[in-house]
Amino acid sequence: MSWPADTHPTGLEPGRIVTLLNDELPRAASYWIAYSGGVDSSVLLHLMAAVRERLGAPVTAVHVDHGLQRDSGLWAEHCARQCAAIGMPLVALAVDARARSGQSPEAAARAARYAAIGDAMQAGDMLLTAHHLEDQAETVLLQMLRGAGVEGLSAMPLCRDWYGRWLVRPLLAASRDEILAWARARGIAWVDDPSNADSGPERNYLRHTVLPALTARWPAAARSLARSAHLCAQAAQTVAEQADADLTRAGVDAGARLRIDVLCALEPARAANLLRRWLRARGAPALPAARLDQALHQLCQARADAQPLVTWSGHALRRFRGEAWLVSGETVAAPQTLRRWDGRTLDLGPGLGRLECREAAPGIDPGRWRRGVVEVGYRRPGMRFRPAGAGASRDFKRLAHEYGIPPWLRDRVPVIFIDGEPAALAGCCVCEPFTAGDRTGCWPVWVPPS
């Protein structure tokens, strides 16, 4: 959930901050100010100090030392002095912000910073950051250059739900010049990060080269870009509402799977919108545009007996019995050896989930369980099962078909053996002669990995 960022007023008036936090946004359990020591966050710090008595929750500043600059320790000391001078509580954090392979230094620092701050906060707290008008304009330009749609072009919202907390940017409508003037007029001290002058990173290049050139030709460029972001946010909300309505119709098992007939009956843009929304709801990373088109084509156009597969970022899309499944893209080989099982919850290993024993009728007969050697294994060539009450025995393929086990899971469904014979297929059936009949016994349940 997010609030689109409108462009007026600037938010540099204390009264406006009070109205925003008390009347227009969710009430917070406490407020945290992301305080780097730079001019933008210093202005936000002093604004919040001026209004803290008029808010219904405590206010705390938080500074993160990334350890990437030689003088980062001096900046932390500066932040401590400034907070002490105005009586603002300060939480100082230190993180390892070194970039991993393939990760940009900026992304690594941002991820480490937000993770550390999030860990320090509690549910219902609100983090305030000092992003401003030009930050918003730069974000719009970056998203345009990346080929983003209306959601990406919405850029940064004024307020959004952030892992059970709130992330708010109260200065989004204020320009950099307005913030500088406000700080100078009040004699506020700040520190400058020399890395901000480096035009190498994408955002810095936009800040120092592209946006000034645009502003020289179109003086209102930054405000116009921010206004476009606001309009895109409104459009994105409408698109999301349509996708949610389609997901309500197409979702199966609380949205765990997606009905192919509903998906493919939609016109292409709406179908793509639904698929994106469903993947996001399931916690999957976004599909690149070309892969999204490929996924829709395979799900909707592949012949009935085909097993379409689209993989990306450790995830995979599959189709089974008219439904789209989101599964792990990793291939996991089930062990060939048997494991003894005492009926307690059993972790089967990476990518294999867990096995539980739940009391139910019919289950495995407790007497047969006590007298026998109970083990857990997986399908074997030539294996046959005789489900209780079903008459003739069946091979594994037929049994899996009857119980709707998707082909990619069949090698991973646990088989319970008693004295070396198949006694149950987890979550599906108990076999003769091991059933408890109408009496309560152990019903083995397989919980696949997420």
Image: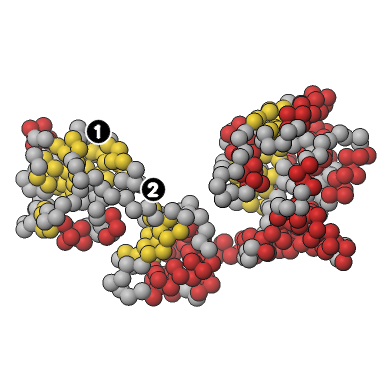
Give yes or no for contact between labels 1 and 2 (Cβ–Cβ under 8 Å).
no
Location of residue 141 with respect to 39 vertically, above or below: below
Amino acid type at mark 2: Ser
Q: Mark on residue 450?
A: 2
Label 1, residues with CA under 10 Å away: few <14, some 14-19, many ≥20: few
Whether residue 26 can be seen here: yes
Between 399 and 230, which is closer to the camera in this rendering?
399
Q: Residue at x 80, y 25 (%)?
A: 81
Q: Mark on residue 97?
A: none
Q: Residue at x 68, y 37 (%)?
A: 68
Q: Is residue 420 left or right of residue 340?
A: left
Q: Is residue 228 left or right of residue 273?
A: right
| The quarter of the displayed image where residue 214 is located | bottom right
- Name the secondary structure under disc 2: loop
- Rounded to the nearest angstrom, the CA distance separating label 1 from label 2 is 20 Å
Q: Residue at x 11, y 35 (%)?
A: 373
Earlier-in-chain disc, 1 versus 2: 1
Between 1 and 277, which is closer to the camera in this rendering?
277
Q: Is residue 329 left or right of residue 407?
A: right
* x and y, in percent, of residue 248 in the image: 46, 61
Whether residue 47 can be seen here: no
* x and y, in percent, of residue 101 in the image: 55, 47
Amino acid type at mark 1: Arg
Q: Residue at x 8, y 56 (%)?
A: 393
Between 335 and 391, which is closer to the camera in this rendering?
335
Between 340 and 166, which is closer to the camera in this rendering?
340
* Residue wearing tag 1: 344
